[in-house]
Amino acid sequence: MTMTFRKTGTALSAIALAAMIGAAGMSPGATTAAPYQPGGYVELVERVAPAVVTIEVEQKAQLMSDAQGAMPRDFPFEEFYKRFGLPAPEFDHGPRGEMPVRKGAGTGFIISENGQIVTNAHVVHGADTVRVTLEDGRSYEAEVVGEDTATDLAVLKIEAQGLTAVAFGDSDALKVGENVVAMGNPFGLGNTVTTGIVSAVGRDINAGLFDNFIQTDAAINRGNSGGPLFNEAGEVVGINTAIVSPSGGSVGIGFSVPANMAKAVVEDLTDDGQVARGWLGVQIQPVSEDVATALGLEAAQGAMIARVVEDTPAQKAGLEKGDIVLAVGDAPVESPRDLTRLIAGDSPGDTVMLKVLRKGQAQELSVTLGSRADQPA
């Protein structure tokens, strides 16, 4: 059966609590049972739940040829999609002659007391209206401050004060097997809590250049998109984004954007609505085992320069085809993906030092980065 990566849209879970039962008929002077103490994550959930919000969006549907894939009124395949339960958009048909309205739902979380909210870019992308509902039922129209499709993150703003906010934790400190808690709005049911462990870190699911996902078996379903993944301290260590599923529902393989990646993106989006990323101007490829052996490398690691684009920071710095980049500053480059992430993590105008292997000889090259945002995809 083909496995499908899905952006998470809208699973139910229950947290079992163990009750302490005192023994009956205890003899005089016997010690009584300790007072009942709830188990699980009750205190954590009570503390962070007010910061988790439901996001509802509406968008006027486009023609089928559009990237959004929404169908106009009376499109012949609309009934087919509905009858077989395929994930077609919902439709609110207005008077004949008007385009239908596409509706969607997701999750977000508050990171400042004055109404700054983080969610997934795919939750709000292209939306005409975005509405945020708090745990206590208050509802606000939200402004999309900025989106970054490369990492699938977005920042929203609502006009409110004194809100409960949560903080980002250190996702680099996560260990496989560590307990985590996911919160969100699966299938539009409202705030739902699921628990699991960190199944893996650094996952590349071929979703984009900056794949570095946390994998978890905490149940994530449609509607959980943009919701927080908490560690046991109640810190946000990931933003729930996608699942692998042959059915569309949770099978215990979910993916979250790491908090340490999100921090920098959120900061940039909050500043001016855009993310400024460094850019070299090269095409890169993995280092093969044959090349590694020929150059005397202990392992096939690094990023090989396949092409240097003219009039770019890379050309000006003297990078050449065939160079193998082994490190950016003190950060090792194990693969082409590492080089992409490290360079993009710096800002345009920054100067970085590249450790390069050229024809078996180690060199260091200083590069002043350009702007990735200025370059065509």
Image: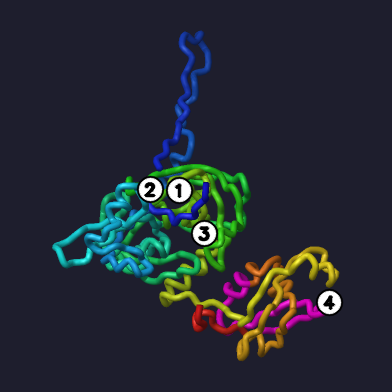
Tell me the element at label 2. helix
Real-space Cα separation, disc 2 to disc 1, in angstroms: 8 Å
- Would you name the residue on which mark 1 appears? 220
Q: Does the magenta stretch include residue 320?
A: no
Q: For label 4, count other residues whose C-alpha is less than 10 Å away and answer few (under 14), some (14-19) or many (20+).
A: some
**Pair 4/3: label in front:** 4
Q: Where is residue 262 in the image (x, y as percent from the top left)?
A: 50, 64
Which of the numbered marks, if any, corresponds to residue 257? 3
The mark that comes first in sequence, 2 or 4, is: 2
Seen in the image, is 37 located left or right of residue 302? Answer: left
| In the foreground, 208 or 18 | 208
Give how far apart the Cα atoms at labels 4 and 3 are.
Answer: 37 Å
Q: What residue type is labelled 2?
A: Pro
Q: What stretch is highlighted in magenta?
A: 340-367
Q: Between marks 3 and 1, how big is the CA–CA gap?
A: 13 Å
Q: Which mark is residue 360?
A: 4
Query: Do labels 4 and 3 touch, CB within 8 Å?
Result: no
- Position of residue 335 relative to residue 377, above or below, is above
* Residue in the image at 38% along x and 55% along y: 107
